Image (tube, grey):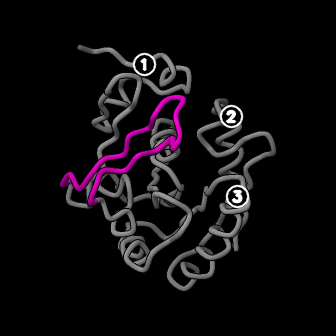
């Protein structure tokens, strides 16, 4: 009991954050529970180490119907939107309110859930690839009717916000976000 695979700590996560998010371990895989806004378990995602696909979602999980992390959100000047669970957990570990859309596409149901979040601004922190850029553009168009929308430009050399280990870079990235 208490074993956590080395690669999870190599990514920079603390035991405290893993406990707060209710994570578990199966062999060398990280199991991350997915809860709805009322904290009910609706599924889980398994982050596999060194296997493809990297992420396995539980059977029956309707990713398009949930915002990962929504149950933890408290009123905030802005809330970050990421693609993945680890990105949201990473931003949370660094003191930023965040939810993940569990992919690059923003569904109608997720848009409706975002509108209910206690904030005036959404900060898009999608991955630094072509799909992330397309997702950012689509999300800005959809969400700008209801919120101030901004986005971060992840520096070259980083795939996503979870790749950025230096807390100063994360802070600078969010503080220098671009408003749409």
**Mark earlier in primary sequence (1, 2):** 1
Q: Residue furthest front?
A: 52
Image quarter of residue 24: top left
- Residue 53: image location, x then y, percent: 51, 44
Q: Magenta span has 65?
A: no
Whether residue 46 appears in magenta in the rendering, the answer is yes
Q: Earlier in the sequence, mark 1 or mark 3?
A: 1
Nearer the observer: mark 1 or 2; the answer is 1
- The residue under the point 48% across, 27% down is 13
What is the C-alpha distance between the residues marked 1 and 2?
Answer: 27 Å
User: What is the x, y in percent for residue 171?
Assistant: 65, 42
Q: Which residues are magenta?
A: 40-60
Question: Which residue is under mark 1?
Answer: 5
Q: Is residue 34 above or below residue 148?
A: above
Q: Secondary structure at mark 2?
A: helix
Q: Quadrant of residue 152 in the image?
A: bottom right
Q: Nearer the viewer, residue 124 or 120?
A: 124
Find disc 3 in the rendering and name its residue: 177
> Which residue is at a point 59% across and 39% down the rendered structure image?
162
In the picture, measured across the screen, residue 13 lies left or right of residue 24, that is: right
Bin the neighbour count of mark 2 within 10 Å (Cα to Cα): few under 14, some 14-19, many 20 and up: few
155 over 27 or under it: above or below: below
Q: Residues within 10 Å of mark 1 (few under 14, many from 20)?
A: some
Q: CA distance from mark 1 to mark 3?
A: 34 Å
Task: Work out how far the residue at label 3 is from the one at label 2, CA to CA, in angstroms.
Answer: 14 Å
Q: Which residue is mark 2?
A: 168
Residue 5, how many percent across, how many down?
A: 42, 18
């Amino acid at each position: 009991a208490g074993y956590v695979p080395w690669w999870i700590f190599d990514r920079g996560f603390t035991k405290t954050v893993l406990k707060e998010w209710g994570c578990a371990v199966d062999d060398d895989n990280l199991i991350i529970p997915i809860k709805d806004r009322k904290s009910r378990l609706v599924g889980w995602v398994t982050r596999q180490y060194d296997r493809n696909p990297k992420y396995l979602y539980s059977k029956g999980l309707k990713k398009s119907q949930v915002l990962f992390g929504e149950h933890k959100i408290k009123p905030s000047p802005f809330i970050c939107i990421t693609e993945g669970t680890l990105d949201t957990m990473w931003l949370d570990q660094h003191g930023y309110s965040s939810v993940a859309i569990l992919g690059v596409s923003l569904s109608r149901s997720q848009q409706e859930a975002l509108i209910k979040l206690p904030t005036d601004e959404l900060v898009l922190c999608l991955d630094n690839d072509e799909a992330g850029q397309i997702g950012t553009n689509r999300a800005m168009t959809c969400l700008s009717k209801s919120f101030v929308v901004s986005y971060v430009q992840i520096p070259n050399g980083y795939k996503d916000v979870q790749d950025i280990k230096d807390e100063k870079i994360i802070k600078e990235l969010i503080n220098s976000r671009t408003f749409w």
